[in-house]
Amino acid sequence: MPNRGDLPAGFRWGVSTAAYQIEGAVAEDGRGPSVWDVFCERPGAVKGGESGRIACDHYHRYGEDVELMRGLGVDGYRFSIAWPRIQPTGSGPANPAGLAFYDRLVDALLAAGITPLPTLFHWDLPQALEDGGGWLARDTAYRFAEYAELALDRLGDRVPAWITLNEPFVHMVFGYALGIHAPGRALMLDALPAAHHQLLGHGLAAGLLRERGHQVLIANNFTPVRPASEAPADVAAAEAYDALHNRLFTDPLLRGRYPDLSAYGVTPDLGGSVRPGDLELIAAAGLDGLGVNYYNPTRIAAPTEPGGLPFAEAEIDGVPRTAFGWPVVPDGLRELLLGLRTRYGNALPPITITENGCSTDATLDDGFRIDYLATHLDALAQAHAQGIDVRGYYTWSLIDNVEWAEGTSQRFGLVHVDFDTQRRTPKASYAWYRDLIATHRARQRGWAAGPRRP
């Protein structure tokens, strides 16, 4: 059976982070407040009352973190640009100091032989835009395109590919529907305009980026959806959930239309958000790659009470769980990728795994994480052997960070961070990933066999 040693030559290895989770320096060099800065001030919003005010102090310690990446031997680094660093109020001219930081970071990466892969939006909307409606307001899509152009003008000579949005589904649901992430709105289905306006922003920015010769990806959280039983009601509930989680942000890009959301009582124009020409613009921008963030499958049953959502989440039993409580199902990644190909056929662009990883309670001897990465990479290799065009794997995450509403309680990093001293200490998984990358390259040159599974 194919394993991680059989991933193709030219396969790109990387690590991922996000600006608010690691940078800190939230009030330095002209950066404006983001929705997360404001959300973290709410009593009880974030575990332990923590915030990204200091985080990993990457803003000042980026050189040390680039050296950690150099030590890993990664090909690429997926990071996000903090919109409020570039435009403190979400509009108007660029903040020179903010752009200068990303200048320094990109130059340091290139000097280390690492290709930068920036994400333009990873949930840290400028608070001034949220005050005007945030992603519920159509105008935010146009502001996003203007911000993208500012970043492109400054960094485009050294950055070949860009990710427009990270996990727009999660941002819409957690931030606007349930209120457990910033900006903390609990609107349920009235949050759907935030879906369309994020996609409209993607289309506007992607059109500009591709027009100027850059590659464009979007990264979404995908989950294979499994009905709790073969009963028609469970199957229908699973189909309804799949439409919301997996298809809402992918069908418009690859099929030019939204999926059927009639199970939610939602019209094809998402309650009037979609205007003539919008879907054509979103689809016409095109994608050079699809970023897939995978953590676990979802098991869905029919709802037990009428009048609510048309699905209920059911437990996945008999599998290990991460420190976050997420089920560990490596073959779900293969299942997911094959399902995407079945659904979209030739319209499916090349795949890059832009996030995959786990939280563990271990400090440095994180054998659980090593096994997690190994088994998921084996599943990825099996998907490749079954014809999936997969170009790279960016594990989440390089370093322990502020895990959004969980604060620093969940540690996803290959590198341990002492948040009191900011000392970085590579974990066992760091050495394993480093050796895996080196061995894969050597094996592709015919020099050595693949690494042993732990």
Image: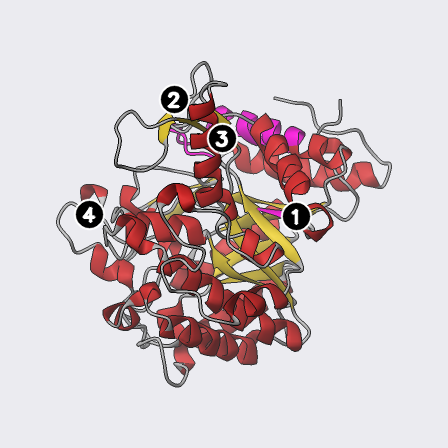
Image location of residue 335, percent across then percent down: 61, 31
> Quick one: label 1 or label 3, which is nearer the N terminus?
3
Identify which amino acid the numbered label 2 is placed on. Answer: Glu
Q: Is residue 419 above or below residue 330?
A: below
Q: Between tags 1 and 4, which lies in front?
A: 1
Image location of residue 18, percent across then percent down: 43, 55
> Quick one: label 3 or label 4, which is nearer the N terminus?
4
Q: Which residue is mark 4?
A: 45
**Distance between mark 3 and mark 2 Cα atoms:** 10 Å
- Image quarter (top left, top right, bottom left or bottom right) of the C terminus: top right
Residue 345: quadrant of the picture:
top right
Residue 372 counted in the magenta span: yes
Identify which amino acid the numbered label 1 is placed on. Answer: Ile
In the image as oriented, which residue stretches furthest toward the top? 318
Q: Secondary structure at mark 4?
A: loop
> What is the span of residues highlighted in magenta in the rendered image?
352-379
- Mark carried by residue 315: 2
Q: Between tags 3 and 4, which lies in front?
A: 3
Q: Which residue is mark 3?
A: 297
Q: Which residue is mark 1?
A: 351
Asked if the residues shown at circle 1 and circle 3 are in contact, with their CB atoms under 8 angstroms apart, the answer is no
Q: Is residue 453 above or below residue 384?
A: above
